[in-house]
Amino acid sequence: MVKRMTCDCGGRYEEAVRDFDGIACPSMVCGSCGDAVFTIEQSKRYRELRLERMVEKVTPENRHEEIPTSPSRPARKYHKWADLEKKLFTPERLAEIDREVAKEIRRMNRREIKRRLDMPYTLEFTRNSDGSFFVKVKEFRGCMSEGDTIEEAYAMIRDAMAGWMKSMLEDRKPIPEPRSKRR
């Protein structure tokens, strides 16, 4: 099933194979700007491909290897894949791979947050009775901040927006589009 997603530039994401760290992996690529993102299934496939890349190629010719035991006993055969699997797929190694994939996802999320911070979201500033400023983002439910000056309030709300978007991306929830872009 091909998913239909729209990029923030207005283009459509199409499923395509893209090179990530030397690994050709399916991803969703915007036809207009070239931005690439993973769906959950594609993220899992990327992890599988990274694991496959680390495993030595075991061909039918070298699948078994003879190990000499002693002069009186004949050599016995062992299965290379089983030993390789024990060595490469330890819980520690799998945890390390998960951390690497999570790091890549965080890197992609940081790029997405930075791009979205420059979008025209609706900020509502209100002057408090003590002269400070309260600001909230209309599109982001619960995203608000405060500052002594309007410049400080603006800096604080940008930080709050980044945290709000990071939380949404980690929970795999969609980030609302700016109201001016929804028309």
Image (spheres, rainbow, N blue to C red):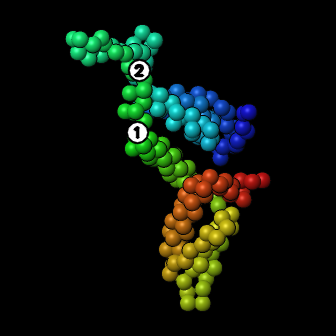
Of label 1 and label 2, which has the lower sequence position?
A: 2
Residue sitting at the far bottom: 129
In the picture of the structure, the residue carrying the numbered disc 1 is: 90
Q: Is residue 106 left or right of residue 3?
A: left
Label 2 environment density (alpha carbons within 10 Å; few <14, some 14–19, many ≥20): few
**Numbered-mark total:** 2
Q: Residue furthest right?
A: 183
Eye-nearest disc, 1 or 2 = 2
Name, please, the residue furthest toward the left.
71
Res 167 label? none
Q: Nearer the viewer, residue 179 or 166?
A: 166
Expressed as whole percent of the image width and height from the top left, the position of residue 120 reads 64, 58
Image check: 172 left or right of 102? right
**Amino acid type, residue under disc 2 in the picture:** His
Identify the disc placed on residue 79.
Answer: 2
Q: Secondary structure at mark 2?
A: strand
Residue type, mark 1 in image: Thr
Determine crowd level at label 1: few under 14, some 14-19, many 20+ residues with C-alpha closer than 10 A. few
Relative vertical location of residue 114 with respect to residue 100 in this rendering, above or below: below
**Image quarter of the N terminus:** top right
User: Dividing the picture into quarters, in which one does residue 175 lie?
Assistant: bottom right
